[in-house]
Amino acid sequence: MEEYADDPVVAEVDVYHTQALADHLSLLQYPLRPAHLPYDSIEGAKVSAEGSLSLEVGVRPRGNNYSTSRGEGFAKMVQLGVKGQEKVYQSGLWDKLTLTSDKPSETPARYVAAVFKDGDLHLTSVKHILQLKPTLSYLDAAESGAKASVAGSDGETTESEGEEAVPVNVRFARQKGQSAYPLRKSFAETNRCDWSDATYYGIESEEATEERGLLFASEDAGVNFDLRPSEYLNVVCPMDQPLSSDGPVAMPTGVLSLSQLKTLPLDEQVFKLLLNAHIERFGQLCSLLGVTGQSGGVLKAVQACGVLVQGCWVIKSDLLYPEDQAKRNARDYILWCFTQRRLVPRKEVVGVVKLSQEELRQIMRPLSVVRVTPSSGWELKLSTDIDFLNKQVAIVHEQERRWEQRHRQLVNELSLKAPTKHTEGKVVEPVVKTLPVGETPAAQSVKSESSTEELLKAVTGFCREGLGRGVLGLAELKDKLLLKQSILGVDHLLCGGGVGDAILVEGVRACGALEITAGGRSLYAHTHGEKVREVILSLLQKHKSVKRKAIVECLKAEGVSMADKALTSALKELCYSRGSQWKLLGTD
């Protein structure tokens, strides 16, 4: 109990569990709506036989963000698309929206609703969690109305001109991919649902107040605490049926369940993680897989489905585009460019890959971020994993050899200019330098060393200024550098293109900052000669988190006494609190 010594118990609360609403209580979530902007009004509700919920919510047509002309246009088009029915929008404006939830999961939600009353905590099990999202069915109706309007006008024109209509047979090729099938199936099932009207009661109505009263239990509904954690969970959130053994519950597109992932073989786990992320650090992969010791199996699996770019692992193009050679070649060329530099100019890519803007965006979005600098282009999303490059030298050399071989293939397939020289696995074009008249090679070497020293001095000054009194990783520091470069002139020393990861790290260390490795990444913070910052950072170099009491004791040992307010201020500059623990900013 020593770890809770500075976190004393201040009160004890009786816990009660009621089953009055256990079979009817659902939690409604609005993932596309901020909590501070609730919907204006609910005008109607429907419930399907499968348990889905549909709400019709009002939209204020007189708000500052509402376009009256667009609202009128939508209302007219929707009415044209539903001819023969009563008027959809009585006001003549688009003034209501339909929110619909998916079919609730058969597995009960293991959550409870908790309410305090008279110092007691009352728990009620939640049966389902429903996420309500706009269906935008009015757009379909508007599209139908627009087509009907165009068809009507075309028919009038044809009749007036007296031309004979000629039938035309049109055939469409079947799509090879099945990625849209789950979405089409979901929409079809939603439309086939048997919906029945439900009555909605406002939050202040008598009926709602009466139902809320059922959330409070009687005194004989207490919970027995002489149970193991799993048994207690089953008491509070009982499982009506065991988890399905027929197979994993289907997850939404783009969502990966780690609990389901761990039921698969290791190589398939690595493949699915990399396919979902597109690019990932090796340390993060091991963390997600729960591998803390020997990582040989992960290394073998990741080499089978990924390629190494700047120390990070990227899913192979062959696995993403098995039937599209053009995209496969284009993506491999982009990845090869990223192996040569972190910032790839846009013109260097567009002039080679010959893809549409949308296709290029689909390739670049998961891998990189757009940078507006003197040489506008894309920068790799993750910072260079220097730790992996230093530890796995053999794998790095093997990957460099493969990239060299792949680049030779791309030279033929994309009609690139053939390289003429190879140096340490990187393609280099021959460069002929002419020395100024009267200048010897030795003098040129001295001048180059002087230029490097000046660059390091400039980078060190930038790092001291960029770090300030906070905590930054290499990626955040590079973001600040790019912002600085966009402000400085093109001729400035920092804008010459020679500021890579290595010299940036050297500059950070030269300015006197401390390096702390946490969660597979390096973070940097400056002590500024203050003893309290030095103590905090030195403790966090050894521990993931630290208590305030330990910091105070270390300061006393150093002969430093600080007021509580000053210590709190120093802690907040470097850390964030989780209960009684303080963790370094930028860590989980």
Image (cartoon, rainbow, N blue to C red):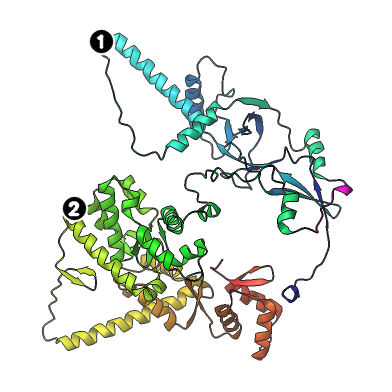
- The correct choice, above or below, for 9 with respect to 62 in the image is below
Q: Are marks 1 and 2 in contact (CB under 8 Å)?
A: no
* Three-letter code for the amino acid on which mark 2 is drawn: Glu
Q: Looking at the image, which is closer to me, 260 or 461?
A: 260
- Please, what is the three-letter code of the amino acid marked with disc 1? Glu
Residue at position x 35%, y 53% in the image:
364
Quarter occupied by the C terminus: bottom right
Dividing the picture into quarters, in which one does residue 458 lie? bottom left
- What is the span of residues highlighted in magenta in the rendered image? 217-227
Q: Where is residue 170 in the image (x, y as percent from the top left)?
A: 28, 23
Q: What element carries label 1?
A: loop
- Residue 163 got which mark? 1
In this view, the residue farthest toward the front is 245
Q: Does the magenta stretch include residue 336?
A: no
Label 2: element kind: helix
Q: Is residue 306 visible?
A: no
Query: How many numbered discs sit on the rendered protein?
Result: 2
- Residue 575, by quadrant, is bottom right
Judging by the rendered image, the residue that carries numbered circle 2 is: 413
Q: Where is residue 112 in the image (x, y as percent from the top left)?
A: 72, 48
Residue 419 horizontal/vertical position (percent): 16, 65
Give me the disc on residue 388.
none
Q: Of callouts 1 and 2, which one flags the residue occurring earlier in the amino acid sequence?
A: 1
The overriding secondary structure of the stretch rendered in magenta is loop
Report crowding for label 2: few under 14, some 14 to 19, many 20 or more residues within 10 A (C-alpha): few
- In the image, is 574 to the left or to the right of 520? right
* 196 w.r.t. 581: above or below: above
Q: In this view, does 404 lie to the left or right of 147?
A: left
The percent coordinates of residue 198 (x first, y second) are: 68, 28
